[in-house]
């Protein structure tokens, strides 16, 4: 029973944790400007993240080492340095976007400009990351992210014209008035939002911290192959609701207020509340996890209270990185 | 020069070439297409701002959203519109055709600023005034959308 509960929680956390600020913004903008013509990109992105996360989990479970260790070992320190630099740059950008996302969610709730919230958000989340166990943070914000299910239900409430939506999804080309560069720009944005590095870091570093063995592979695969595709459906529902509300009116989405509008139209104030909760959770603390690892003297990393040592047995001074 | 360094000589050449190409595109004088593109972008932003404000206020009149959310959305729409106006004002017409575009879009964007401002004021007054202000938004939004369709 406990194992079943663990698996269910893992799947739910993976679903709720899949959607982040990138999915919200890119999905809404793509839906408003191109209808469902980018739906295939999400499918490819979900396939990619499933393949990579499963591989990262398998590497950790079998070897007890994070993926980056293997990159360094097999490809050499120079290539590893490029990999490390690129990953940190992407993660830095992600942190900026996520802090902004939380502040914008609070602006929706309070009406006070997000600029006021930015320092408070940064401080509170830093304290949360420092003092609260990561497992607790992941559970709270991952499950909170499930509030975004409001968009999936809204698809039905907004009286979707299914044949028209299917027709849009079949066309892998820009509609009249749009061009190919814009189409591909949004396609890359959507793909990148589905295949973000931190999701892979989760699996790799989480596996090392929790000392996965081959026995844990089953649960890891269930989380990946059930949780991520269902999370992908949530991201798709954001795209679909945007296509239903904004695309026929030729309105382009460029703010979080607009992203929430389909939920408001479908469910009123309840929809707005759930959307804001979902936005808040989707942009909160767990996304910061990879960036908040700090190397210790022994070459391991520490990730706040309760974190265990990374790569036990690694010689001092080796790469202080857990993914 | 050792052989390791000699291997990297194409890198500065490529960087200089990229810099030169970027410099050319950034400094070349605007032509008709540049002005038209800037005008269409401004009109699109203006239309987006008005249409979003319209949808949000409609939901508020139906009692489906909060005042804070509406205020926030109207504020953001005003910011978007201000940005569109700034972008449009910064572009200089280059010939008679672009002067025609300016003379058509300028008053439209001003009308958009006016109706959106009226909507924000009316929202503080009450639902009757808001409904009346909302009626004035639609024609301006339609004209902006029509402008985009004709010039895009």
Image (spheres, coloured by chain):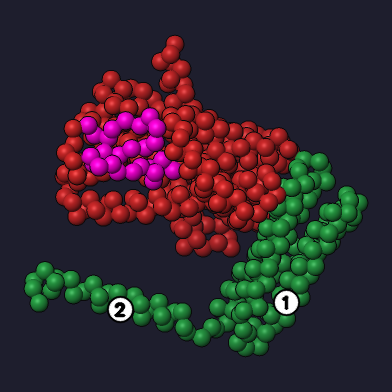
* Colour displayed for chain A in the image of the structure: red
Q: What residue lies at 77% left-to-right and 47% top-to-bottom?
A: B67
In the visual, does A254 lie left or right of B117? left
Residue A164 in view:
no
Q: Position of residue A126 (x, y in %)?
A: 47, 43
Q: Residue at x 40, y 15 (%)?
A: A3
Residue A311 x, y percent position in the rendering: 24, 34
Pointer 2 residue: B16
- At 47% from the left edge and 29% from the top edge, which residue is drawn? A136
Q: To which chain does the residue with label 2 belong?
A: B
> Can you give x and y, in whole percent of width and height, for residue A11 in the image?
45, 26
Q: Quadrant of the N terminus of chain A?
A: top left
Q: Residue at x 46, y 21 (%)?
A: A8
> Mark 2 or mark 1: which is in front?
2
Quick check: is A291 in the magenta stretch?
Answer: yes
Q: Secondary structure at mark 2?
A: helix
- Please name the residue that numbered disc 1 is placed on: B106
In the picture provided, is A88 more to the left or to the right than B142? left
Residue A274 visible? The answer is: yes
| Residue A183: mark in rendering | none
Q: Is residue A87 left or right of residue B67?
A: left
Magenta segment: does it hold A201? no
Chain drawn green, letter?
B
| Vertical relation: A192 (above or below) B78 | above
Tell me where the magenta segment starts and ends, as one range. Answer: A288-312
Chain under numbered label 1:
B
Residue B44 quadrant = bottom right
* Residue at the limit of the structure toward the right, as seen here: B128
Q: What secondary structure predominates along the stretch shown in magenta?
A: loop
Mark 1 or mark 2, which is nearer the start of the sequence? Answer: 2
Farthest left residue in view: B2
């Amino acid at each position: 029973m406990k194992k079943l509960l663990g698996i269910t929680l893992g799947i739910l956390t993976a679903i709720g944790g899949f959607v982040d600020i990138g999915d919200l913004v890119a999905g809404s903008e793509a839906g408003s400007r191109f209808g469902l013509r980018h739906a295939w990109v999400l499918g490819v992105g979900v396939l990619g993240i499933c393949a990579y996360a499963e591989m990262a989990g398998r590497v950790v479970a079998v070897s007890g080492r994070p993926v980056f260790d293997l990159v360094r070992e097999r490809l050499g320190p120079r290539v590893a340095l490029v990999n490390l630099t690129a990953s940190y740059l992407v993660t830095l950008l992600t942190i900026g976007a996520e802090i902004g996302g939380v502040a914008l969610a609070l602006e929706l709730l309070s009406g006070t400009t997000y600029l006021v919230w930015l320092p408070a958000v940064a401080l509170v989340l830093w304290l949360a990351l420092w003092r609260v166990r990561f497992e607790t943070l992941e559970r709270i914000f991952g499950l909170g992210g499930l509030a975004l299910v409001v968009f999936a239900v809204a698809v039905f409430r907004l009286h979707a014209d299914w044949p028209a939506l299917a027709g849009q999804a079949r066309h892998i080309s820009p509609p009249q008035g749009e061009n190919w560069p814009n189409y591909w720009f949004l396609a890359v944005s959507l793909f990148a939002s589905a295949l973000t590095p931190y999701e892979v870091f989760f699996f790799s570093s989480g596996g090392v911290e929790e000392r996965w063995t081959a026995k844990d592979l089953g649960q890891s695969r269930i989380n990946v192959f059930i949780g991520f595709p269902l999370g992908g459906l949530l991201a798709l529902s954001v795209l679909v609701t945007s296509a239903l509300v904004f695309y026929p009116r030729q309105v382009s989405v460029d703010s979080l207020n607009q992203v929430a509008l389909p939920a408001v139209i479908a469910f009123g104030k309840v929809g707005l509340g759930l959307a804001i909760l979902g936005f808040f959770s989707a942009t909160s603390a767990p996304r910061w996890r990879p960036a908040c690892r700090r190397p210790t003297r022994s070459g391991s990393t520490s990730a706040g209270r309760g974190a265990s040592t990374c790569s036990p047995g690694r010689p001092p001074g080796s790469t202080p990185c857990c993914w | 020069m050792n052989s390791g360094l000699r291997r990297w000589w194409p890198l500065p050449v490529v960087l200089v070439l990229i810099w030169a190409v970027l410099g050319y595109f950034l400094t070349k004088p605007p032509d008709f297409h540049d002005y038209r593109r800037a005008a269409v972008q401004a009109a699109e932003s203006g239309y987006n701002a008005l249409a979003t404000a319209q949808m949000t206020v409609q939901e508020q009149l139906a009692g489906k959203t909060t005042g804070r959310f509406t205020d926030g959305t109207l504020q953001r729409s005003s910011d978007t519109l201000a940005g569109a106006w700034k972008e449009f004002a910064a572009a200089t017409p280059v010939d008679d055709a672009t002067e025609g575009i300016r003379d058509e879009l300028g008053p439209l964007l001003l009308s958009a600023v006016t109706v959106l401002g009226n909507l924000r004021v009316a929202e503080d007054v009450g639902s009757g005034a808001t409904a009346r202000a909302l009626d004035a938004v639609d024609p301006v939004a339609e004209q902006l959308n029509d402008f985009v369709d004709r010039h895009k």
